[in-house]
Amino acid sequence: LPSASLYSMCHVFCELRCLWPAWTVVAMFSTAHYNILQLDIVAPKEGSRMPPMEKVVPFVPFLAVAGMSIDYSVLDPHPFWVGCIYTLGWLGYIIYFLWALRMFDLASPKFEEERPEVPGQA
């Protein structure tokens, strides 16, 4: 879903030359991504050292659409705005890297102690 929102956003900006449809497309896909992650990752994993990135990662395309809105706007290409765009991009990279670490943390096996055997218990 993040790739669908990014593809749609880039299509709207580059081919249609529109601004507001890009924001609405990103909002729809980000909302769907957030809801799917909430259904998939129900409870936090015990012993996890990673923050719950599943609450943050669906909204990374908003950083991209904000950066593209600045880039395609009528603002003069001042170093401040270029720095803002690069900051938004690097923030997205960092969030996706933390998301990958969170997925590794969720998928990594954990040692569980066996329950003592009691007659009559399954």
Image (spheres, grey):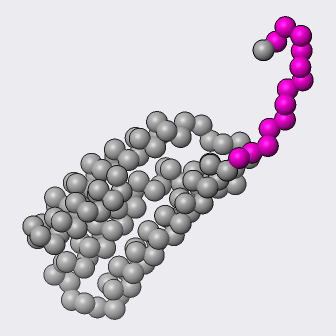
- Rendering coords of residue 26 (x, y %): 27, 56
- Rendering coords of residue 92 (x, y %): 44, 68
Q: Above or below — where is 111 with respect to 61?
A: above
Work out which residue is located at the far left of the displayed protein and give it.
16
- Rendering coords of residue 89 (x, y %): 40, 75
Residue 120 within the magenta-colored segment of the rendering: yes
Query: Which residue is located at x 89 percent, y 15 percent?
Result: 118
Query: Which quadrant holds the C terminus?
Result: top right
Query: Which residue is located at x 80 percent, y 38 percent?
Result: 112
Provide the residue span drawn in magenta: 109-121
- Rendering coords of residue 19 (x, y %): 16, 66
Q: Is residue 86 left or right of residue 99?
A: left
Our reading of the magenta stretch's main secondary structure is loop
Query: Which residue is located at x 39 percent, y 81 percent?
Result: 86
Seen from the viewer's position, the closer of residues 100 and 65 is 100
Q: Is residue 42 left or right of residue 60?
A: right
Q: Quadrant of residue 23?
A: bottom left
Residue 86 within the magenta-colored segment of the rendering: no
Query: Can residue 68 be seen in the rendering of this structure?
Result: yes
